[in-house]
Image (spheres, rainbow, N blue to C red):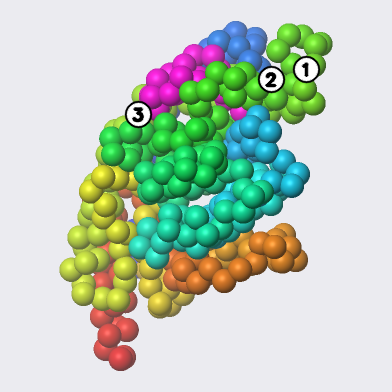
Amino acid sequence: MKAKSWGAPVAFYDLRRHDETIRAELEEASRRVIASGRFVLGQEVEAFECEFAAYCGVRHCIGVGNGLDALHLVLRGLGIGTGDEVIVPAQTFIATWLAVSYAGAVPVPIDVDPATANIAPELVEAAITPRTRAVIPVHLFGRPADMHAVSAIAKRRNLVLIEDAAQAHGATYHGKRAGSLGDAAAFSFYPSKNLGAFGDGGAVLCDDSTLARLVRTLRNYGSTSKYHHELMGYNSRLDELQAAVLRVKLRYLDIWNQRRTRIADLYTKGISRLNSSINTPAHEEHVSSSWHLYVIRSTQRDGLQSFLASRGIESAIHYPRTPAEQDAYGRHTATISGNPNAVRHARCSLSLPIAPYLENSEVTAVLDAIREYVGRVEQLE
Ligand SMILES: Cc1ncc(COP(=O)(O)O)c(C=O)c1O
């Protein structure tokens, strides 16, 4: 990005700057894997699986190829497929829905809570049919969904509860970590995630040993011993290099999330002081977000985004369309229903730069630009 005369640019997320802070350790981990000559299903993956399971407070972690596969393999491991329905939030990254479709089941969207953008528990019950097998709350942007409420309904109606924790590494809900709040959980280690690899990666977490064994088998061609295939499985394994990188980064995750939390606080305080129509993320006492994204809502979203860009500040939209509005799902009438909060969120949300390496001065630059924009818009009104 070109430097502008009114101040240094602020990138939305700069992976190189992030990784630079622990470069020597990352290089050492990579060298260790190269020297081992083992790149698939070796010691690094085993060690990472133990370390991440312990971190999240669950018995099993199974490293897989990516977050979408993690969700898909959980569904397959649970025997969910053709003829089944799975309740999903109407606003999420499309992978939540795709995993259900891959399994052969139908994603049934319900609207999100307007304040948190997470699944609205009070709508779950009405969406349940005799075909419903599971519900997948997404901890969107790193904020854990209202798991107690959803879990109570899931228990009463005999549904499996699967967390889409792809954005919630290290987040907590009533003191328990995301990944330990349902029957199974799926994580993504896509490079820009709070815990990100040097490529694609994902993991399934669960306490149930039978499910863990099935997912472990499914990820490796349906095989537990060489050339014996119990199941028609897949090739979806976290590789050794990614596992070694993730082991290094896991040691920093809490420190990084603390810095993200501090930045989120600065944004919330700074924006609240403006008395503008911009909505900041809701505060919930029992929830600690991983702050994967800091998402504000404004009816002037597009104008605000252009203005920030003119001041050298990158922002992003997560996500400009709901999955039901995507061509991929647009023709499937079963998935289309009125979900006004989800659609409104898609039209109004704007993600500001948030990263552990951001300096306070950069956060101030973002806030100054927002203040200037609010001042201008209010003068016009
Ligand atoms: C909420 C959510 N679910 C699932 C995924 C899929 O993860 P992956 O990109 O690793 O397949 C993502 C990835 O961005 C996500 O944000």
Amino acid bearing label 2? Thr
> Are circles 1 and 2 on residues that touch, CB within 8 Å?
yes
What numbered label is drawn on residue 217?
2
- The residues tagged by marks 1 and 3 sit, at their Cα atoms, a distance apart of 39 Å
Q: Does label 3 point to a residue whose CB lies under 8 Å from ligand 1?
A: no
What numbered label is drawn on residue 252?
3
Rate crowding at label 2 as few (under 14), some (14 to 19) or many (20 or more) other CA atoms within 10 Å. Answer: many
What residue appears at the point 51 percent right and 28 percent down from the top-left corner?
205
SS for dot 2:
helix
- Who comes first in sequence, dot 1 or dot 2? 2
Amino acid bearing label 3? Tyr
Relative placement, left or right, of 218 versus 381 is right
Relative placement, left or right, of 277 versus 189 is left
> Are circles 1 and 3 on residues that touch, CB within 8 Å?
no
Whether residue 376 is situated above or below residue 213 in the rendered picture: below
- The residues tagged by marks 3 and 2 sit, at their Cα atoms, a distance apart of 31 Å
Rate crowding at label 3 as few (under 14), some (14 to 19) or many (20 or more) other CA atoms within 10 Å. Answer: some
What residue appears at the point 33 percent right and 45 percent down from the top-left corner?
289
Q: Quadrant of ligand 1?
A: top right
Which portion, as a residue range, is magenta? 45-65
Rate crowding at label 1 as few (under 14), some (14 to 19) or many (20 or more) other CA atoms within 10 Å. Answer: some
Which quadrant of the view contains residue 43?
top right
Amino acid bearing label 1? Glu
What residue appears at the point 68 percent right and 38 percent down from the top-left corner?
80
What residue appears at the point 40 percent right and 27 percent down from the top-left corner?
56
- Who comes first in sequence, dot 3 or dot 2? 2
Q: Is residue 277 magenta?
A: no
Outermost residue to the bottom: 381
What numbered label is drawn on residue 230?
1
